[in-house]
Amino acid sequence: MRKLILVRHGQTQMNVDGIFFGKLDPSLNETGKEQCKKTRELLKNRYKYDFIYSSDLKRAAETAEIVNYLDLPIKLDKRLEEIDFGIFEGLSYKEILEKYPAEAKKSQEEWKTFDYITGESLEVLQRRAVEFVESLDKTKDNLVVTHWGVINCILSWYFSDKLESYWKYSMENGGICVIEFAEDFPILKGLNIG
C-alpha cells in the first residue's frame, strides 16, 4: 500500500492579509517557517517517504526544503502550482468586489468553470493535479508539498465526484494530509495533521 503525503506550504504575509494569490510568488513569513519546522518533526516521527515533490513556487519550495528530513532530492513540478487567479491576483476580496463586481459574481455562480480572466478554472487545476498524482510510482510513498487549491482538488477527485466536495476540506498552512492507496482504492488516513 502506498502513501500520498500532502503538505500545504507554510504561511506567507499574503495569507495573513487575505490576498488572492496563486501565481504570485511570496516567500514564507516567520510564522510559516515555524509551522514548517513543526511539520518536519511530525513527518520525522510518523512518516517515511521514497520521493519528495514540490510546486516550484517559492512558498512551497521553501516548505519542502524545511520538511525534507530525509534530505532527498526535491523534484519541482509545475503541475503542483496553485490556481492562477488571473485578474484577481494580488487583490483582497473587497478590492475584487469593487474592481470586478460582475466577474466576482460569475466566479461564485460558475465556480467550477470560471477561468478568472487570464487565469485558469478549477477544472483545469484539478486536471493537472490528478494527472500529477496518477503519474507517481504506485509502489512508493510520495511526499508532495503544494497548495490549498491543489490539495482540495486531489481530495475532491478521489473522495467525491470530480469537484463536488472541493469546498469541504480545510487544510491549514503547514498541515499534513495522508491518503493510502490499496490497489488503487484511496483511503483518507489523516486530514490537517499538525
Image (spheres, rainbow, N blue to C red):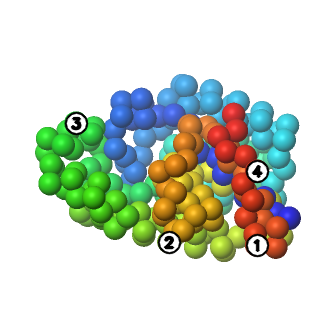
Question: In whole angstroms, how far apart are the C-alphas of marks 1 and 2?
Answer: 18 Å
The amino acid on which the numbered mark 1 sits, given as a three-letter code, is: Asp
Q: What's the residue at 50%, 71% (across, down)?
A: 127
Mark toward the viewer: 4 or 3: 4
The amino acid on which the numbered mark 4 sits, given as a three-letter code, is: Lys
The amino acid on which the numbered mark 2 sits, given as a three-letter code, is: Arg
Q: Residues within 10 Å of mark 3 (few under 14, many from 20)?
A: few
Q: Residues within 10 Å of mark 2 (few under 14, many from 20)?
A: some
Location of residue 69 (image quadrant): top right
Question: In whole angstroms, how far apart are the C-alphas of marks 3 and 2?
Answer: 30 Å
Location of residue 140 (image quadrant): bottom right
Mark 1 and mark 2 in contact? Answer it, CB < 8 Å.
Answer: no
Earlier-in-chain disc, 4 versus 3: 3
Mark 4 and mark 1 in contact? Answer it, CB < 8 Å.
Answer: no
Mark 2 and mark 4 in contact? Answer it, CB < 8 Å.
Answer: no
Q: What's the residue at 49%, 56% (across, down)?
A: 166
Earlier-in-chain disc, 2 versus 4: 2
Q: What's the residue at 49%, 62% (across, down)?
A: 164
Residue 149 location, x and y as percent? 48, 53
Question: In whole angstroms, how far apart are the C-alphas of marks 1 and 3?
Answer: 43 Å
What residue is shown with label 1?
Answer: 184
What residue is shown with label 4?
Answer: 189
Earlier-in-chain disc, 1 versus 3: 3
Q: What's the residue at 75%, 69% (across, down)?
A: 185
The amino acid on which the numbered mark 3 sits, given as a three-letter code, is: Lys
Earlier-in-chain disc, 1 versus 2: 2
Q: Find residue 127 and name its label.
A: 2
